[in-house]
Amino acid sequence: MRIQQKDGWHDFLSDYDYTSNLGRDRWAWEWLRRNPVFRKAAFAHPVEDISTRETCYGIRIRKLRAAQPQAEAFGLAYFPNPDLGALRADVIWSRKTYPRPVCVQVISAEAGVVDEIFQRTVRKCRITHFTDAENHQHLLLRGAGCVLQVRVEGLSLVTLEPREMKLILDEFADWERYVKVLKRAVRVYGDDDTSTPQWSQKALQARNALICIDGADAGLTKLQMAEIIYGADRVREERNSKGRKLKDAMRRYCAKGEEMRAGGYVELLSSLPE
């Protein structure tokens, strides 16, 4: 994200609306792709390491030809393009770094058996099938302003043989927590919503921290960042009253943003979902 001053700072918030619905793994990418060390390593890596083709239903098949140890050091299976945001980049986190994605088991199916998971997915989502250097399969499902990484166990999905997918339910000992994970996961099957984004308190704080990172990289002052987040009128009102609430908030957002892009995103990925 590049922030450039035009006629004021009033219209930049909408550029971050796409983050309102991101899961932990997509937020982790937003932090990492702003890390200058990561960006340098990613752009130095050849893109020829991945083969890409398209099959029926518009499914993209991507296969990593060789391991990328440098990417793995950041927790990734390979280097995506850092200039692409969370909804566009084909980000695949490693199993070690992101141990709790939604998981499906692929089994043989009898001829004529309808795979309900597959049928619903191809109707509602844009699908990328990714095979990493260890021959592990992953799916990226895009829909309704969401991206879902799915770990695939069992048989290969890249085949003409009949297959069936089953959800694996043993990832979490806490059943209530697992239900919450599934509830978030099925959002990808919803209808695209172009209405005003709905922000949770945690997502709003993360967005503000993201704005502070981009603002600092663009040479903005904390005052200018505050005007983007809160509006010029609110900032002027606090300055006239000699209050400190916004100053303290901006200090926290800047510190949080720097912490997350410097490596805090890893803890976000490994933590239990809330």
Image (spheres, rainbow, N blue to C red):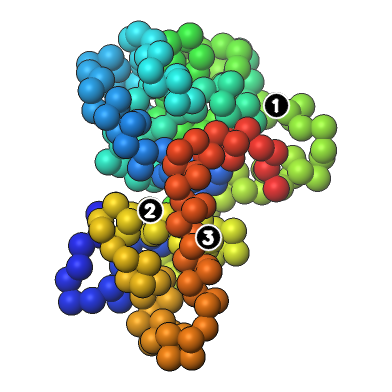
Q: Is residue 258 left or right of residue 14?
A: right
Secondary structure state at the residue bearing disc 3: helix
Query: Which sits earlier in the primary sequence, circle 3 or circle 2?
Result: 2
Could you say which disc has been placed on residue 252 in the image?
3
Distance of label 1 from label 3 (alpha carbons):
39 Å
Q: Residue at x 56, y 43 (%)?
A: 24
Q: Is residue 170 left or right of residue 20?
A: right
Secondary structure state at the residue bearing disc 1: loop
Distance of label 1 from label 2 (alpha carbons):
38 Å
Could you say which disc has been placed on residue 168 in the image?
1
Other-residue count near label 1 (Cα within 10 Å), few / some / many at <14 / 14–19 / ≥20:
few
At label 3, which amino acid type do we have?
A: Arg
Q: Residue at x 46, y 33 (%)?
A: 140
Q: Residue at x 70, y 38 (%)?
A: 272
At label 2, which amino acid type do we have?
A: Ile
Query: Which sits earlier in the primary sequence, circle 1 or circle 3?
Result: 1
Q: Is residue 192 left or right of residue 52?
A: right
Q: Nearer the viewer, mark 3 or mark 2?
A: 3
Q: Nearer the viewer, residue 52 or 55?
A: 52
